[in-house]
Amino acid sequence: MAYAGVLVSDPFLSSHFTQKELRSLKAEFDSLKDETGLITAKNLELGVAKLSFFQQALTKDEIAVIMKQQDPNATGGLDFESFLRMYLDLQNSGSSKISPEKNSSAFLKNAVTTLIHTISDSEKKAYVDHINSYLEDDAVLSKVLPIDPSTNQVFELVKDGILLSKLINVAVPGTIDERALNIKEKLNPWERNENHTLCLNSAKAIGCSVVNIGTQDLAEGRPHLILGLISQIVKIQLLAGVNLKTTPELAEMLDDTEEVEELLNLPAEKVLLRWMNYHLKKAGYQKEVTNFASDVKDSEAYTVLLHALAPEGCNLTPLNEKDLYERAKAVLVQAEKINCRKYLTPRDIVDGSANLNLAFVAHLFHQRNGLTLDSNKISFAEMIQDNEQDSREERAFRMWINSLGIETYVNQVFEDVRDGWVLLEVLDKVAKGSVNWRHANKPPIKMPFKKVENCNQTIEIGKALQFSLVNIAGNDIVQGNKKLILAFLWQLMRYNVLQLLKNLKLQGKDVSDADILLWANEKVRRAGKSSRMESFKDKSLSNGVFFLDLLGAVEPRVVNLALVTDGETDDDKRQNAIYIISVARKLGCSIFLLWDDIVEVRPKMILTLTASIMLWNLKDKANKAAKTAAVLDLKTENGSAG
């Protein structure tokens, strides 16, 4: 008899649990549910001692917080998937280094506290204004824009997935092929879920952290999660041009002792602070601004910066104001004179709102960076040979790493992995228990040999996982050897995908590249299509037809055949490739490649795309089998009762 498993319809939830974990949690859920199949507040209060992840009783207030958070529509209790979301919320709110069994009181206090979510009205207004500004000409959204920032209208509008998808495309143009969006007056739940799935997978692909956000959260318009996601998307948009490649005049900030590579490796936020301090120092300001919160509360830095960038419209008179709120008001009046007032209110400055101060400074940078094109430094900056292939692989691995939900956010792979800590975090995610944390050195690491120790451990683990690591040592990573770092990360990403596939196969056998190739060709053949993939290097794949046939084979409804071209011209190939990526993400595949990777048939990216489609298909089959088994069990129970 085939094992069907425990059914979970939300792809976000199914990706966070093994079947073993689901069976254990289902048993705990069943021990508390009532005859309606839900866990009521009363049952949770009385039966909390039965749950392994709570080690002490909860108060009525704590129960009320949990129920309000997990049952926002007041359906009367928690269903199984709400129960799973509660479990994830509690796990994610506790420290990853503290076991709830060992420190249950602190863990519980931490967990319940984080369930009480508040949202900032200032941030909501700032982001709604941003949406109104950048999407005002969108034909699809014209009926609902502008959004009233004084209401919660924005949280209602995101429930169909269209608004957030459009915002992602503003932040990183071309991320979502809007032909793949379900756009019409009334969407059914399935169509909304597809939009949300596409939105979340696309958000991951541009660098957003969506570890704690599922499609159900978007469908319910959960304010704190929606605002958090919008904040990330807006930040990505505003910081997109804050780098040496896009704004080469930033090279003006370098002194004679610095190398251009140092500026190239700085994350955008650090570049922005560096830019701000560069102008402040030139203007004679003595303090250094190290953050976008406490260091700008007194508005002094803003007053001097605006005067330095636009002396014709901004003066230093705000410094005469003793009251910080009045001074902040005066600063923003000056910013308005030069059309640079956006995102901030005086209260946001005084309160040190980091997100909104960052947005304000980024906007100011784009409007008036105050830098000149120093021909000597610019030509030097342009001489840097940017290996396009390395750059694209770095991007794919960076987005993949950040999607795993590790504690460290990666801004620049080649720089951020050099102390070994990020690689150890990733290894701990994809091969649980492989890292000996007692022998790991946590950043900041000043002694070089400590970095080597971390990197040596990553190499040792890689060898234990049977990676090909001939002539690679820990010191190569410390030295920032791009070729070897990319080789290691590729094997790590491939291992992760193959392990996920192995876990889904009932026989539990290892899955090889050849198995993935065979599966894909067999799927397409059974669907009655003639296209075929000879290998992951097959140049015929550049037209995109095979992958559209494959996607149609695993879910016929997801591909609109009217949009598929024969892929003969370069533009047709590009259109097919763009459509493939959005359709795959809409289906539920987590992929990080670009359309160029398909058109150029880059084998590593082709393999991950194929494996991701296979992974979704196996999950879908397992869920359907579990659903069928659940229905049969219910019929059996009802028959017995009768």
Image (cartoon, helix red, strand yellow):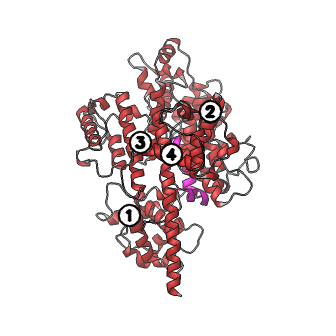
Give the class, few, some or many, for how many residues have Cα within 10 Å of label 2's Cα (few <14, many ≥20). many
- The amino acid on which the numbered mark 4 sits, given as a three-letter code, is Ala
Going 37% across and 75% down the picture, which residue do you hit?
50
Sequence-wise, the earlier of marks 1 and 3 is 1
- In this figure, which residue is indicated by the disc labeled 2? 573
Side of 379 where 497 appears, left or right: left
Question: From the viewer's perspective, is the residue at label 1 or at label 2 nearer?
Answer: 2
Sequence-wise, the earlier of marks 1 and 4 is 1
Q: Residue 587, labelled with which disc?
A: none
Q: Are marks 3 and 4 in contact (CB under 8 Å)?
A: no
- The amino acid on which the numbered mark 1 sits, given as a three-letter code, is Lys
Q: CA distance from mark 1 to mark 4?
A: 28 Å
Where 567 sits versus 636, above or below? above
Magenta highlight range: 205-228
Circle 2: element type: helix
Sequence-wise, the earlier of marks 3 and 4 is 3
Sequence-wise, the earlier of marks 4 and 2 is 4
Side of 226 where 405 appears, left or right: left
